[in-house]
Amino acid sequence: MKTFVTTILSLLILITLSISHTNAQYVFGETAVTIAEDDASNYDPPEWNQENNEGFGFRNWSFDTATPNNEGFAGSFIGSFSSELDTDGKVFGLFANSANDVSSGATRGFPAALSEGESFSVSVGVNFRDGAKGFDLRDASNGTIINFNVGGDQYILDGTVLFSNEYDANTVFTFTFTQNSDNVDWVVNRTGGRTETQSGTISDISPGTISNIRLYNVSAGGAGDDGGARNLFFNSLKFDGVYAIPDGESVTITEDIELPYLIIQNGGTFTASDATSRTVTISSSLPGDVNTFVNNGTFNIGTGGST
């Protein structure tokens, strides 16, 4: 099996040379299409658990809590933060209060690890800035690749101070992370009491590395939690992938290809044959992949072809 980097480089060259499209503005392997999305409006409080996974495209939620010495309180809930963050009056929330080292976490796996040209976005709402709360973008082994943390009266994204740490009680940050060939671009749009935008690049992150998000709250409140002002709130998770064919698009391959995944949405068409039958391999070697083929549209393959 080729190494990951070699596979990706070869795939990009192959896509450029051997795939035709019906729409010049849509390029398979380059044009991002939403393949996973979820928000709190899909859930009825208090139901939000590992058996209650809504939206589409993402892997199941998983939760973790820690209350050392059986002290303190930690958990997850569906609540409300502000009109800037809520969808239909609902957001996801994590609490961890009344003791040191109490923690609560919620993890969501991506449909596949971020490939070049793909992006992930999430919105976060915070008020008080004690304890530690935020999220980690992680690899398939759950190692932290990118961290956003609110604590010590600071907003820090992977070592970068956001918005000069200026406080507002209704702060909402919407993060978008886009994978490039060897780094990740980020944009943060701030709304609520202040309206600002900040952006940057985090170096030395290869495609196929980031595969899930864990949101967390650690020791961020005393007894009573000041009416929830120390909770972590979040909403509107979205993953845009480049190996999906949307409604009205048709893709024909003219060479054998290997893909990390292939999604044919309703109304899309993928043809794995021109004058000669072709082979499509859904790779199981890429880090964090889900090895998934979803055929909601039309898949055509000639006699002698294979998938």
Image (cartoon, rainbow, N blue to C red):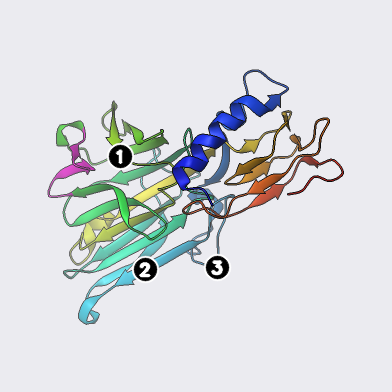
Residue 64 is labelled as 2
Kind of residue at badge 3: Glu
Badge count? 3
| Residue drawn at the location 36% of the way across and 59% of the way down | 142
Alpha carbon separation for disc pair 3 and 2 = 14 Å
Comparing labels 1 and 3, the label whose residue is closer to the camera: 1
Alpha carbon separation for disc pair 1 and 3 = 36 Å
Of residues 13 and 182, the one drawn nearer to the viewer in this rendering: 13
Question: Furthest-left residue in view?
Answer: 152
Examine the structure image and report whether residue 158 is included in the region drawn in magenta.
yes
| Residue drawn at the location 20% of the way across and 31% of the way down | 163
* Residue bearing the label numbered 1: 204
Relative image position of residue 76 (x, y in whole percent): 38, 63
Tell me the SS state at disc 1.
Answer: loop
Q: Is residue 245 left or right of residue 170?
A: right
The region drawn magenta spans: 151-162
Crowding at label 2, few (<14), some or many (≥20) Cα neighbours within 10 Å?
Answer: some
Kind of residue at badge 1: Asp
Q: Is residue 266 above or below residue 189?
A: below
Relative image position of residue 94 (x, y in whole percent): 34, 59
* Residue bearing the label numbered 3: 51
Tell me the SS state at disc 2.
Answer: strand
Crowding at label 3, few (<14), some or many (≥20) Cα neighbours within 10 Å?
Answer: few
Q: Is residue 275 above or below residue 47?
A: above
Of labels 3 and 2, earlier in sequence is 3
Of labels 1 and 2, earlier in sequence is 2
Of residues 189 and 278, the one drawn nearer to the viewer in this rendering: 278
